[in-house]
Amino acid sequence: MIFRKVSIIGVGLIGGSIGEALKKKRLAKEIIGVGHRTSSIKEALKRGAIDKGTLKAVKGVEGADLVIIATRVGLIPGFGRMIGKTLKKGCVVTDVGSTKAGIVGLMEKSIPCGAAFVGSHPMTGSEKRGIKSAKEDLFKGSTVIMTKSKKTDTVAVKKLERFWKSLGVSRVAVRSPEKHDRIVAEISHLPHIVVAALINSASGESLGFASTGFKDTTRIAASDPDIWRDICMTNRKEILRALDNYGRNLSRIRKLIKEGSGAGLCREFGKSKARRKSLS
Amino acid sequence: MIFRKVSIIGVGLIGGSIGEALKKKRLAKEIIGVGHRTSSIKEALKRGAIDKGTLKAVKGVEGADLVIIATRVGLIPGFGRMIGKTLKKGCVVTDVGSTKAGIVGLMEKSIPCGAAFVGSHPMTGSEKRGIKSAKEDLFKGSTVIMTKSKKTDTVAVKKLERFWKSLGVSRVAVRSPEKHDRIVAEISHLPHIVVAALINSASGESLGFASTGFKDTTRIAASDPDIWRDICMTNRKEILRALDNYGRNLSRIRKLIKEGSGAGLCREFGKSKARRKSLS
């Protein structure tokens, strides 16, 4: 057992799944869930994802060895400020947010000496949300990016790496918060924006002809708007950079279509085929 | 039985699946397969998708009641010119191409009086290709768009509609070739281009962090380049139109990110969520 008392702030899809996995694998002696609705705490208790629940974050983190903030990105720094003074010595704090540079900077100011903050981003999930979609094997075979800044405690990084792997994560990559934000802008944030614009640009009649291909392509567009607003608002620089690079790739294909260049189109689509094949 | 002798030109994924479905459901007395490689004809014979095979299209369509041209788009008009004079009176010719205005115009010139051409576009398929991926239930529950121009024979449309439904197609929509091309530009061709540009714009390191979301989004990018070259080359006007409309939607989101407008982003992502939810 790496951590004795674990507090999870936000018992939704990710927080709930962490709790369920910890319980199932007997990796924590006690799990406290902090929710902002009584109903989700009740559900988390019913599912056995947590041992105790509270609506009060400060109370919930008392005596914890590990605190995981599993709320949407926009709420994470506020919880950091709220709990900072209550954390016990040696406590490790992490989050599961999809953007990192802003969060790490703010959290490092809020978490006092004696405790340690390390950012985490589990690269798994679903377009679904909430404790009802939680499952103990959500992390199985997945990747987590953890962050390391100049201030990051190396021992805490090692502890958290073991923590994530014990949940079934198969790959933990450690990057600077800025590098993380660049990577996920390209591989996660840009795709969401591209797909949102795609489905928003189709006419109602055309949507009536959507096949499985279109549905697979746009599945991620069903995620909640507030999650994606938070992500876009906290990773603006890298997302704009990725969008501009994407725009150049799209313009190149547009130009080839306009000019009727069959050979050029074969080259572009051949490149995308090879890249997609390399992923599966 | 609607057709006695059916000739399928191109025994790949679509042509092979049509053959397998016709045999399984005992809907044709004889099925002739026309291939351009001996190996695919042998495989089609082995799988029972066709009764006889030939490399010669003209020979293959002799005496046929129904001819289905199931090659990539760029080859369809050439086969039309090749077989026109051999078709027996009353023969119905269709294709399964993904673009229609150009094909219908050329085919109507090639198919003689006494025979009838009606364009078909089965809105199903796979990023896979070839007879080895064929399956008799490929069309089950799918949609086919058939075309109707001023010259289209209404009786042939009815016959073909029954044909497609007998293969398991649940919806047959009849549109003008031009309207078809506009619809599929939005719901099929634009998505392919958007996703190709997306995967082409990611760095190698970022691709190493691709999760299931990214893989689902980009699955269609694994299709063959020559199929998509043909589609882009024969539906340029509508694809460019769809691309420009898409570009406006994308620019709107980009502007909101740049300006840091959380409310505007929630509106755009809320729209895409609602649209995606309406599809499932």
Image (spheres, coloured by chain):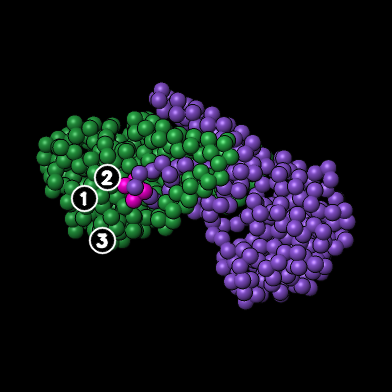
Chain colours: A green, B purple
Using residue A116 as the reference point, say whether residue A133 is left or right of it.
Answer: right
Residue A163 image position (x, y, % from top left): 23, 54
Above/below status of B12 relative to B120: below
User: Are the residues under badges 2 and 1 in a single subunit?
Assistant: yes
Looking at the image, residue B54 lies above or below residue B266: below
Q: Are marks 3 and 2 on the same chain?
A: yes
Q: Please tell me which residue lies in front, B157 or A210.
A: B157
Three-letter code, disc 3: Arg
Q: Residues within 10 Å of mark 2 (few under 14, many from 20)?
A: many
**Mark 2 belongs to which amino acid?**
Ser
Residue placed under numbered mark 3 in the picture: A26
Distance (Cα) linking label 3 and label 2: 22 Å
Q: Residues within 10 Å of mark 3 (few under 14, many from 20)?
A: few
Name the mark on residue A120. 2
SS for callout 3: loop
* Outermost residue, bottom side: B46
The residue depicted at 57 percent of the width and 68 percent of the height is B132
Disc 3 vs disc 2: Cβ atoms closer than 8 Å? no
Q: Secondary structure at mark 1?
A: helix
> Where residue B201 sits in the image (x, y, percent)?
41, 41
What is the span of residues highlighted in magenta in the rendered image?
A: B205-209
Q: CA distance from mark 2 to mark 1?
A: 9 Å
Side of B244 relative to A111 (left or right)? right
Q: Which mark is residue A160?
A: 1
Residue at x 56%, y 61% (from the top left corner): B129
Label 2: which secondary element = strand
Tell me the subunit letter for badge 2. A
Whether pointer 2 and pointer 1 mark residues with C-beta atoms closer than 8 Å, the reply is yes
Tell me where residue A248 appears, x and y as whole percent. Answer: 44, 34
Q: Which tag is nearer the camera, tag 3 or tag 2? A: 2
